[in-house]
Amino acid sequence: MNKAYDFCKKNLKKKSTPKYVKAQMREFMRICEEKSEKYVISKHKLQQIESVLKLLVMPKGLKAGQSLYDCTCGYQWLFYIAILCTVYRDNESKRRYETGILEICRKNFKTYTVATLFILLFLTEPKFSKFYSVAPDGSLSREIREAIAETIRSSPLIYEYRNKKRFKILRDYIMFNPTHTQYIPLSYSTSRMDGKLPNVFCADEVGALPISYPIEAMRSGQLNILNKLGFIISTKYPTVDNPFEDEVSYAKKVLDGIEKDETVFALLYEPDKTKCWETDDLILQQANPVALEIPEIWEDLLKKRAKAIAVESSRENFVTKHCNIIYQGVGTETYIDVKDVQECKVADIDWRGRVVYLGLDLSETNDNTSVSMVSVDNANNVLAESFAFIPEGRIEEKQAYEKVNYRELLRTNKVIACGDRVIDYKFAEDFILNLEEKYGVHIQAIGYDRWNALSTAQKLESEGYNLVEIRQHSSVLHPPTKLLKEKILSREFKYTRNNLLEINFQNARCVYDTNKNQYVNKKKSKGKVDMVVSLINAVYLLQQDYFLNQMDFVIQTF
């Protein structure tokens, strides 16, 4: 039928194809096989793309001088044809897809895929179209522009017609003269995004963007565009708190049938299983489709993997950028995969009438202060809510240093700004004093670390609360650390939406003492883990009173 269909048919049942790519393949093949009542593949648009790719010439690399038609890899065919050629059956001028998401590792021609998309669109979109690319910095924007310019200049049948140049290639933009269509590269750090009216935009390396503003600004400018189109492209980055993970999460819900959105097309080349990256070739295969077609790239990946195993300092970059796994640190053991935590998220928890335990983790100068509340339901699920307090006068500083968008998090009820340059402990103390009334609970005990918390503990004790000092020692913390992990893995842990808690879990690293006792180590963790620490303190109390004592314990009423 077409090269994209052939690619899908060949790879649909292979283990080397990730499950979400398989899901998208099945939908594409269904349309190609005329099984969709609503959508078809436009033969005219398909011929246009094939014709253009035959005229474009690869400017450099292993296949320099060959036509892009012969150089284009399988996943690229699928991405191009599905997005640009899938149209409404009753109106072939209207494309189905408005968003194309590509999650793929380095050395898989990601930047060149972006460049090719813009060249194809130059030659197929209406007059006076405006294209934009958005990148985290000017250097990356220039890479995309240079790839476009090099390809055009290497393709004489595209670049010139009757001795006249069809493209104007300048530093700040590229113009296709016959239709006055313009491509303008933007960088997030220097360019304002508001006021742009893009027919098409591409956001590259979205995982490196601190906030989703550039994407949303582009989308806002497309409200009156018939065939609006936006490409969201990136590798994984070391944090779950970035706009790309939000886009990927939504795409997975669409592919899983949880969300109904027929305008999203997503190729998510991330491995189905993330353990044993050191030895499991399938992880590399699922994250690097190009390596399955080009032996030189596969051999290079194996060399990089061997180095990452041998040299700790190169491990994070390899696992993140070449395996598409959010790597959670070197030199220590990851506490728990944040994906397992996210599986425990629920829409709401009814706290009324519950006996609860609180855990405190009070901050030093630039740390967060955290309070966690836990209880148990009738099914032995651990219920949890965690709150963080941050100094209001250090928000911008913390955002820049931690790469966490605290301004956005403040809009939730889980992160609270108080004080100026340091935390206002009285504010946190008052918050605790109001918890019983706010949530309708009874606080059985409050666990705390003596460090930095003695004064607060005394004040809360004077208000009639039962304060329990929890020594921050591996022998003490190992049991609740282990219990919390077990509850999460068995899906017997419940929490409501809390992005900062997920970030803290992603940051958390464990170490072992000489007796094999496991505990979360702040110094070894990469980033803040205050919410996890306060949660473990709360679980310690819960474990002592309920799980260990096996007593008749009333948890629903008081």
Image (cartoon, rainbow, N blue to C red):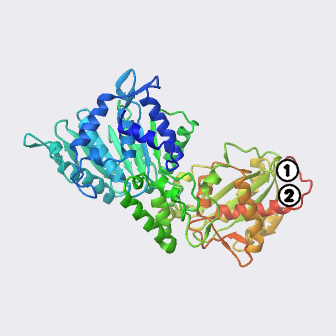
- Choose between 345 and 445: the one closer to the eye: 345
Quarter location, residue 522? bottom right
Q: Position of residue 211 (x, y in %)?
A: 46, 52
Determine whether 54 is above or below 531 in the image: above
Identified at 26% across, 45% down, the residue is: 183
On the image, numbered disc 2 is attached to which residue? 546
Q: Looking at the image, do the residues carrying marks 1 and 2 touch, with CB atoms under 8 Å apart? A: yes
Compared across the picture, whether 11 is left or right of 362 comes to: left
Q: Rate crowding at label 1 as few (under 14), some (14 to 19) or many (20 or more) other CA atoms within 10 Å.
A: some
Task: Check disc 2 and give the amino acid type.
Answer: Tyr
Q: Percent position (x, y) of residue 554?
A: 89, 51
Q: Which residue is at the far bottom? A: 514
Amino acid type at circle 1 is: Ile
Q: Quadrant of residue 137?
A: bottom left
Considering depth in this image, is 47 or 359 the residue closer to the camera?
Answer: 47
Q: Position of residue 326 (x, y in %)?
A: 53, 59
Question: Up-down: is 347 above or below 543?
Answer: above
- Spatial CA span between label 1 and label 2: 9 Å
Report the disc number at residue 134. Answer: none
- In the rendered image, the quadrant that contains the N terminus is top left
Q: Tag 1's secondary structure?
A: loop
Counting residues from the start of the chain, the first of labels 1 and 2 encountered is 2
Q: Which residue is mark 1?
A: 555
Mark 1 or 2, closer to the camera: 2
Which is nearer the eye, 276 or 223? 276
Do we see residue 429 in this rendering?
no
Q: Under tag 2, what secondary structure?
A: helix
